[in-house]
Image (spheres, rainbow, N blue to C red):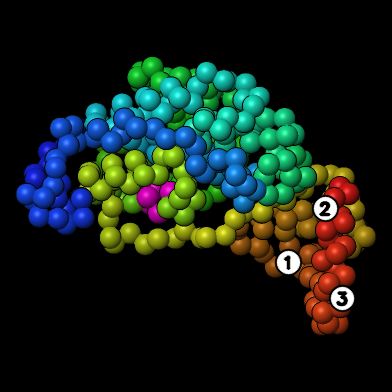
Amino acid sequence: MTDKFTAAEWAAMEGGHAIEDVELPSEPFSFLKDIHEARLTKDNGSSQKLTYFDCGERLYLTLLVLEMMRRYNDSAPFVKSYANKTRGFELYKFYRIMGTDLYNLIYFLVGDNSAQKKLKDPVAAIKLKKETKLPILDLNRYINQLANGTEPKLVSNLMIKLEGVLKIVNTDYKSIRRYLADWDKITRHDKRVAATRLIYAVRAKLRNSDITSDFEKWAAIKNMEKDQVPDPEPTISKPDISISNDSLILYRYLVGNDKLAMTRRFLQLAQNGQSIPKPAVEAYLPIINMIDDLVQAGPAYIQQLRSLHKRAKKDY
């Protein structure tokens, strides 16, 4: 599975210098031995840019990266080392500044309330954590298998579980998971398509992660990025919307009892970034009209709305 590279190819990887100016590494993937402390989740306020959904999505993408890289002899040691640095604290009770981003992402998802308080919308994150049943035993088993250098079992089952629990609806991410399930059977072309889609996702969602640099270098050396694959990645963060029965009942004061079911549907589809059918939009329309009336009334009303919103976030 190991690819061979000429001095000219290594020179190209190093920025196009002349061959005689390039000091070739004794081991092509020696850079993969260095694992740096978590950067995406470093405790310097960076986690406050993440919602609970963001953490789940980034956890899922990190696992896809590890799953792809572990299939190559040259990068398997990095995967083993990264997983070994992640494991050992399977209850995820504490934030670890020297831990991997993977560890801290899991901590934000399953830790106590102090974990979710580090995120962008702590109140919504705490509510969503109560509603989310992460398959932590299966996840720990997978990480331990990677750390031990053994062939992971039931990987597809784990990833499908995570898709459901973390509400992963992105079709590109699911297609990457399917490609990985048949990695030894698919063509070189399909492998490059899957890798390119994952590269785009990593650049958009894991730009500062401790795994990104090594993944991009691996992809460059293996020539896995394919120019013809379009980049579909959005740049916005996915908001946390908790649709509990208690909060939904209160919507009746805004939309009426007869529209509660379709209002729930509207919120679910909006939360998942899916297209919303006309009946659901019509059910939520009274709220849209209310906001529009405030906008039309002028800046003073907008300021009052913003102030009310801040008070509400503190109280619920």
Q: For the N terminus, give its image quadrant.
A: top left
Judging from the image, what secondary structure is the residue with disc 3 in? Answer: helix
- Tell which circle, 3 or 2, labels the residue nearer the N-terminal end: 3
- Tell which circle, 3 or 1, labels the residue nearer the N-terminal end: 1
Residue 73, percent from left and from top: 24, 28
Residue 22, percent from left and from top: 13, 47
**Magenta highlight range:** 197-202
Q: Amino acid at mark 3?
A: Tyr
Count of numbered marks:
3
- Disc 3: which residue: 301
Q: Residue at x 47, y 58 (%)?
A: 233
* Mark 3 crowd level (few <14, some 14–19, many ≥20, 10 Å Cα): some
Q: Amino acid at mark 1?
A: Val
- Disc 2: which residue: 313
Q: Nearer the viewer, residue 176 or 19?
A: 19
Q: Is residue 65 visible?
A: yes
Q: Determine if the magenta segment contains residue 201.
A: yes
Q: Amino acid at mark 2?
A: Lys
Toward which corner of the image does residue 262 lie, by quadrant? bottom right
Q: Nearer the viewer, residue 251 or 208?
A: 208
